[in-house]
Amino acid sequence: MIKNKKILIVGAGGFIGGHLVNRLIKDGNSIVACDIKPKEYWFQDFEDSENHYSMDMKDITNCKKVTKGVDYVFNMACNMGGMGFIENNKAECMQSVLINTNLLIACKEDKVSKYFFSSSACAYNKTKQQEVFIDGLKEEDAYPADPEDGYGWEKLFSERMCRHFMEDYGIQVRVARYHNIYGPYGTFDGGREKAPAALCRKVFNAKKNKDTKIEVWGDGKQTRTFLYIDDCVEGTLRLFESDFSDPVNIGSDEQVSINQMIEIIEDISGIQKLEKIYQLDKPKGVRGRSSNNDLVKKVLNWSYDIKLKDGLKKTYDWISSEMQKEGVNISRFTKS
């Protein structure tokens, strides 16, 4: 357990970052929390942390302000969203490379001993993800390089930057390739939400409005694996405390199609089966993606606990609760 450390978390106002702040505070650490979003748009906001709102970490002067005196840095920041966002905002996604680079430079100058970078399964070679149900992607499948355009290239390049800062300057780095993290306290509307949150919202609205149809991007046969946020945080911290410095998958191996996920959420909500309206012109991403967890089991002796149906139940309950609140400003969960 990480305890009694001063830790900088960049992207602390975001989904994964907010959950990480919460866990590290509970474990007895002093947290410096930064995010480009103003206070009202942080997903979680803790009084026990030193919070820096509206701080753009693409500016190296801001990085240098907050790395002084910290023991560890977690870079959870990036400009991203669901497939609809990353396919239409490639330049914005690519600019996140500045955050990682500037943070590493600041860590080098301030002699920060250990650095975490949140990478993504989008770093994997697209040609290995052309079938609906695929074998899990192993860490070596990122090369030869042909990642998701824009967002995936930023992640792969930033992984290499972390590696070279470790080799050249001695900063210990840890890199997780996240596979579709989901759960409460994240975006569920507005264009940046990922499939689990978007589908929970759509099913809830169908139930509320007595609709009988649901819009689905693509043909619904595309597959993914999804990891619940609590398992993500646990895997992240175990990786950080390990001696392993190469990229590692943090994901589940419970591969499902979008159609299957809709059916799970329908069962959770108690709604009758909805007629699926397939929107074949919408962004769909790769055909199939799954996490091979052999390496994470080997180096961390750990595997995820929460099954997809159980995690979706927690997520659906939270989203439906938020959407039922009268007068609530749900935009704090939807704005970038």
Image (cartoon, grey):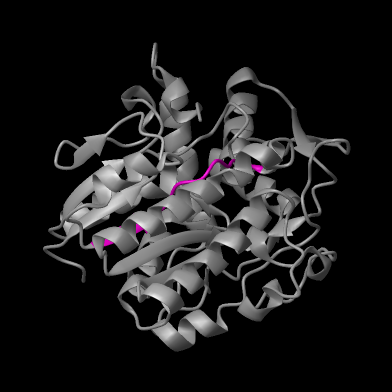
Q: Is residue 77 magenta?
A: yes
Main SS of residues in magenta: loop
In the image, residue 153 sits, relative to residue 13, either above or below, namely below
Q: x, y percentage for residue 275?
A: 80, 35
In the picture provided, is 48 more to the left or to the right than 319?
A: left
In the image, residue 294 sits, relative to residue 150, either above or below, namely below
**Residue visible at 59% across and 35% down?**
192
Question: Nearest the camera: 29 or 168?
Answer: 168
Question: Nearest the camera: 135 or 285?
Answer: 285
Looking at the image, can residue 184 be seen?
no
The quarter of the picture where the N terminus appears is: bottom left
Question: Nearest the camera: 252 or 74?
Answer: 74
Residue located farthest toward the bottom when viewing the structure as drawn: 298
Residue 244 lies in what quarter of the image?
Answer: bottom left
Q: x, y percentage for residue 313?
A: 48, 47
In the picture provided, is 30 more to the left or to the right than 245?
A: left
**Residue visible at 67% across and 56% down?**
153
Count of numbered badges drawn on the protein: 0
In the picture provided, is 119 more to the left or to the right than 148?
A: left
Looking at the image, can residue 278 be seen?
yes
**Residue visible at 32% across and 53% down?**
20
Residue 105 lies in what quarter of the image?
Answer: bottom left
Q: Is residue 299 magenta?
A: no
**Residue visible at 16% across and 36% down?**
47
Q: x, y percentage for residue 142?
A: 68, 72
Residue located farthest toward the top when viewing the structure as drawn: 327
**Highlighted range, magenta:** 72-82
